[in-house]
Amino acid sequence: MYLILAWRNIWRNKRRSLITILSITFAVLLACVMRSMQLGSYERMIENAVRFYTGYIQIHKDGYWNDKVIDNSFEFDSVKLSKVNSLKGVQTYVPRIESFALSSYKSQTKGALIMGVDPERENELTRVKDKLLEGIYLKAKDDGVLLSQGLANYLKATVGDTIVLLGQGYHGANAAGLFPVRGIVKFAMPQQNNQLIYMSLEKAQWFYAADNLITSAALVIDDPDDAQKITKEIREIYKGDAYEIMDWKELVPDLVQSIELDNISGKVMLWILYLVIGFGMFGTYLMMTAERQYEFGVMIAVGMKRLQLQVIVLLEITMMTSIGVLLGILMSLPALTYFHINPIYFGDEAAKAIENFGVEAVYAFSLDPVIFTNQAYAIFIMAIVLAGYPIWSIYKMKPVESMRP
Amino acid sequence: MSTIIKATNISKVYHKTTIPVHALNKLSVNIEEGEFTAIVGPSGCGKTTLLNILGGLDQPTEGKVEIAGTDISTMKDSELIDFRLKNIGFVFQAYNLIPVLTAIENVEFIMLLQKRNKKERHTRAMELLERMDISDKANNKPSQLSGGQQQRVAVARALASKPRFILADEPTANLDSASTSNLLDLMAKMNLEQNATFIFSTHDQRVMDKARRIITLEDGAIVSDVKR
């Protein structure tokens, strides 16, 4: 009967209860959309930077990360890397040799980041084949290169053209060569899209005079949340050797910091929203308590324990909150699902302006369950804290005074 | 007949303003089982205060109240709530039914608090509503009942817990004469048939006419106590 009593009490004042429920619904809806958009953007940024570029874990020669030169490369040790590959949660490893070179076609010249890769393994990590705009993907030991779209545009080179690469190889050797363009690839991140050149690992080792050397081995893992655990296990394998093993948070510290900073501002916005809704909820509880003083007094007078009365009031508040939270989540789900599948891309002008800041010009939405559960927790905690007022009021109530007309 | 209520030298002083108000002044009274008692007197004489103290809703400033041999003057709040639930029925001037519950649910509610099983609750609630001649409105909410009907449900509720006595504070004050007469007849019937003890505070002459004992208060003290 307590449940019946609580449920019917909610609908005694339909308008007020509906306003309270709708305000909670609105808060949850808004909070879910805000967080979904924010976390969706973070996921997209991490995916672009990590999933499709650095990998979640990298192995380098010690000191390479601070001084990314070809001289800091290390021997490609397939035995050790096989051990790493056999660790639980590791899908595969992707060997790379990375360095800079000048790229040139006809009268155009631009600095480029050369990435020598095993085409098949690389594709498992970065899905670079899917980014192909035109031309064909690299084969193993391919003599040609893939140009990033921005760089190709700058050089005014296209599939079938031959570009010149000029740089410094291992231990100061000259690095120079002609490379036919096999394809053009497009990357979401402007930094990558404007300077990347892919070539096969063997061709890059030849170009940099770095036989059997690599600058990094990036790892594909099943679950990004296991990155730290796997990093520790790899450090055990490479114990005592002069290698540095870094997880993605160490690989892209700027990105992690900017996400953390932005996340704080998002949370502050949420707190402000909760505060506004909290005042509304508190107003309802205040009215509910004030107008039922007499009734509470009577119930205690006839023998209802204060705790029982407090439980009924708490049930009312919990029911109202649950309805509001559920409605908010249910209303947000269809829209968020739609935008998760179909992210919002900016128009050309706006996209250019945003990409100038090094960010992909897209509003992506996340469907991480945490988005919904966190809003539910936040609203419930707030409701329980605010319920302290009617509960305290019942605790302090003197039936004789409450029933005085 | 055994003594149900024994109030000895009870005083109640309110200190709401700088001048203390003596609502009750060393008042002593005994109520026997099965009595049909009216407490009367002018406004402000202390009727409601006396009822509140006898009902364990308020504590006397001085003196002692014993209900069936148990001193309730020194009980803690939680003990008093439990004591009231088991021993005292209340009927209020404004009926005070729970607005969201139907008539039968209101009557059952007290028994629910006493943790009685569903079948027993329902059977007794229906029986009481029949005795109070309101069973046909068992599924109506208070807002669908007249004042007299609500007060009959309130009496059924007060009786539901099988209390030792029922305190009724001006139960007819909001009723028309037909409803008053009907309610009083029903209460008198319950008093005679079930030996239920009723204590009223009232200004109503019709209640006084039905009462078998009339205690008159003035300035917080008993000025007459007549048994008929």
Image (spheres, coloured by chain):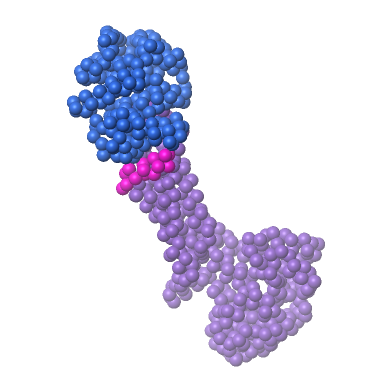
Chain colours: A purple, B blue
Q: Tell me the quadrant of the picture where the C terminus of chain A can be found.
A: top left
In the rendered image, residue B219, in percent from the top left (x then y), is placed at 27, 11
Is A3 inside the magenta-drawn segment?
yes
Horizontally, residue B69 falls left or right of residue B218, namely right
Q: Is residue A10 above or below residue A209?
A: above
**Foreground: A69 or B215?**
B215
Where's the N terminus of chain A, which quadrant?
top left
* Nearest the eye: B52 or B227: B227
Q: Which of the 4 image quarters holds residue A302?
A: top left
Whether residue B59 is visible to the viewer of this picture, yes or no, is: yes
| Residue A83 pos. (x, y %) | 77, 68
Q: Quadrant of residue B56?
A: top left
Residue drawn at the location 65% of the way across and 84% of the way down: A138
Residue A194 image position (x, y, % from top left):
56, 78
* Residue B178 location, quadrant: top left
**Above or below, comparing residue A395 to residue A349 in the picture:** above
- What is the magenta range? A1-16
Report if residue A389 is visible in the image: no
- What number of labels is visible? 0
Q: Main secondary structure of the magenta part?
A: helix
